[in-house]
Amino acid sequence: MDKNYEMDLNRWVDEKLATLGAADTRQPDTERALARFKELHERKGGRLMLWRWAAAPLLAVCLCLAVLPWTRPFALHVWEELTSANVNLPPVSAAVKTLIDGQPAPDFHLKDAWGQEVRLSAFKGKVVLLNFWATWCEGCQQEIPTFIEFQERYRNRGFATIGISMEATGWTTVKPYLETSKVNYPIVVRNDDVAKQYGVASMPMTYLIDRNGKIAATYVGLVDKTNCENVINRLLGK
């Protein structure tokens, strides 16, 4: 990333935030916002220029409005929407975790395309790769072949993959996709409770769960195939 751009961006945000003074004790997560700017810049190249110039005025207005008591709630809402926008890119870092390693993975009861119930607790004793995805997510589409490969390679060693679609349109969109794809593992459609329990705010998002049903690794954004496979092998070897 251009160092001058990064310095200018940091300086600009700092100056704008300084104008808020002590008007509000609720401070925006500037590190996350800046990281998202950088991610967009690196992945989208020149197209970030348009996004930057479109977002900068909105961000400036948001910061200025936050100074006024009667407009502060609206400004903070706009800020949150801007910094948590569900763009079709990996989030800030694969180190960001919603569930802590060693924490029990929340159980769920969801149905697959044939109406069969899929329960996470029924997979206890196996290593599970739990992937949250959507048909419109390019990153999700890129990594599904990797999960198909893992399922084929390790299923006889006590490994299972489960895909949870986050489609707002549900099976109306997912079923046609499954009919043309070669997914060899169960796919279910999420409900709001499952999404909240696993803290799914962007996609793709993947958890590796050990044989005891506990979180062993988290991937926010595209998985690192080599790292993920190494973890799978380690968990299967236990």
Image (spheres, rainbow, N blue to C red):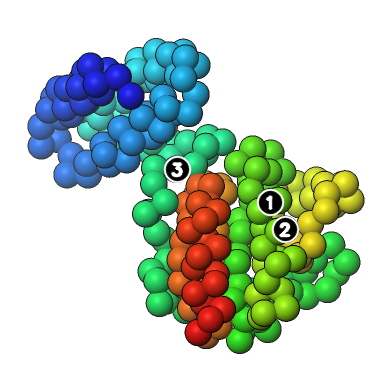
Secondary element at image label 3: loop
Q: Residue 89, image x and y in percent? A: 52, 37
Q: Residues within 10 Å of mark 3 (few under 14, many from 20)?
A: many
- Give the mark, 3 or 2, whose residue is nearer the N terminus: 3
Q: Is residue 232 above or below residue 3?
A: below
For residue 55, side relative to residue 5 (left or right): right
Residue under the point 38% across and 69% down: 100
- Residue under label 3: 91
Quadrant position of the N terminus in the picture: top left
Q: Residue 232, image x and y in percent? A: 55, 69
Q: Are marks 2 and 1 in contact (CB under 8 Å)?
A: yes
Mark 3 or 2: the one toward you: 2
Which of the pair 59/73 is nearer the observer?
59
- Residue under label 2: 148
Asked which quadrant contains residue 111, the reply is: bottom right
Asked which quadrant contains residue 70, the reply is: top left
What is the CA distance from the residue labelled 3 to the residue labelled 2? Answer: 23 Å
For residue 229, side relative to residue 149 (left or right): left
Q: Residues within 10 Å of mark 2 (few under 14, many from 20)?
A: some
Q: Is residue 125 above or below residue 226?
A: below
Secondary element at image label 2: helix
Q: Residue 220, image x and y in percent? A: 47, 52
